[in-house]
């Protein structure tokens, strides 16, 4: 059985004990049925992991005795996923899969073809829900790094303002979209290195509009084909992150 994993944010880097929040305590004790003496890995979402022993099984304030601290090494690249909001619960699944695949950040986008529109309090609630989904996925897959989930943004405005990336990609169904391998090869030839920070945008059902794709091209995005088949947006996001991660690891 794998070790139990919990999220925490200790006040110091080398605590002797860690007292968990009510939610984390309940999940550890009532849901996962951890018992005193069990090994528990507490992580802060930024790469620090405390290997602990469950000392007290209080359901509202479980206490861990710290054995030692270990620091996970981050990936040598950072992928940001800009995802146009899909209908229904699909965004929750995309956030979970993106966390499992090691995405550094996730940016929900409202595009011209997005049927889901969020603002104000509803947007805040959704962001909190996606953060919870990312945390659940990180616990399950053992990822010590939580992706940053930014507030919902307008797609075209985000495209125009996106800065600080080595490479900006956009999944496209349009003629002329290039294979990922050729774009990465051209970057390596020009820069003599692999890209360290990559932004990849995935559109809604029906893709980004021609106007949005035009904005993206003007802002320096490379249109990338995901093959000859039309993928659902959640499939496209997983595919895009998977193949890009594979290529960057290989590089």
Image (cartoon, grey):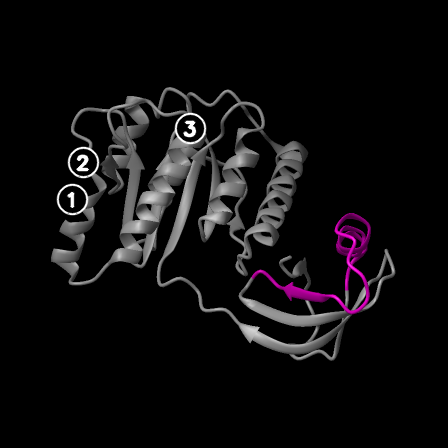
Residue in view at x 76 percent, y 51 percent: 27
Residue 96 is left or right of residue 216, and the answer is: right
Report the front residue among 35 and 152. Answer: 35
Say whether marks 3 and 2 touch (CB < 8 Å): no
Please give the residue where the numbered disc 3 appears in the rendered image.
233
Q: Earlier in the sequence, mark 3 or mark 2?
A: 2
For the residue labelled by badge 1, is the local secondary structure a helix, a strand or a loop? helix
Residue 167, relative to residue 205: is it above or below?
Answer: below
Image quarter (top left, top right, bottom left or bottom right) of the N terminus: bottom right
The label number, if any, that marks residue 23 in the structure image: none
Residue 167 is left or right of residue 26, and the answer is: left
The magenta segment is 20-45
Residue 42 is left or right of residue 189, and the answer is: right
Residue in view at x 58 percent, y 47 percent: 137
In the rendered image, which quarter is residue 5 located in?
A: bottom right
Q: Earlier in the sequence, mark 1 or mark 3?
A: 1
Provide residue 188's location: percent of width, then percent of height: 17, 57
Say whether marks 1 and 2 touch (CB < 8 Å): yes
Crowding at dot 3, Cα within 10 Å, few <14 / some 14-19 / many 20+, comes out as many
Q: CA distance from mark 1 to mark 2?
A: 7 Å
For the residue labelled by badge 3, is the local secondary structure a helix, a strand or a loop? helix
Report whether residue 195 is seen. Answer: no
């Amino acid at each position: 059985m794998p070790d139990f994993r919990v999220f925490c944010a200790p006040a110091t880097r080398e605590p002797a004990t860690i007292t968990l929040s009510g939610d984390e305590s309940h999940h550890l004790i009532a849901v996962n049925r951890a018992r005193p003496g069990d090994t528990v890995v507490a992580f802060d979402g930024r790469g620090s992991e405390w290997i602990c022993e469950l000392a007290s099984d209080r359901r509202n304030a479980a206490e861990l005795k710290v054995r030692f601290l270990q620091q996970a090494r981050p990936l040598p690249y950072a992928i940001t996923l800009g995802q146009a909001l899909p209908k229904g619960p699909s965004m929750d699944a995309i956030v979970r899969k993106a966390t499992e695949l090691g995405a550094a950040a996730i940016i929900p986008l409202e595009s011209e073809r997005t049927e889901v529109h969020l603002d104000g309090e509803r947007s805040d609630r959704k962001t909190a829900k996606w953060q919870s989904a990312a945390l659940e996925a990180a616990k399950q897959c053992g990822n010590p790094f939580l992706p940053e989930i930014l507030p919902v943004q307008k797609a075209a405005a985000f495209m125009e303002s996106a800065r600080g990336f080595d490479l900006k990609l956009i999944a496209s169904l349009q003629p002329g979209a290039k294979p990922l391998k050729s774009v990465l090869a051209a970057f390596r030839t020009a820069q003599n290195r692999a890209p360290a920070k990559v932004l990849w945008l995935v559109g809604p059902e029906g893709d980004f509009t021609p106007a949005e794709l035009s904005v993206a091209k003007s802002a320096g995005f490379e249109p990338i084909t995901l093959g000859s088949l039309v993928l659902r947006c959640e499939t496209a996001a997983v595919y895009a992150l998977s193949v890009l991660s594979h290529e960057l690891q290989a590089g």
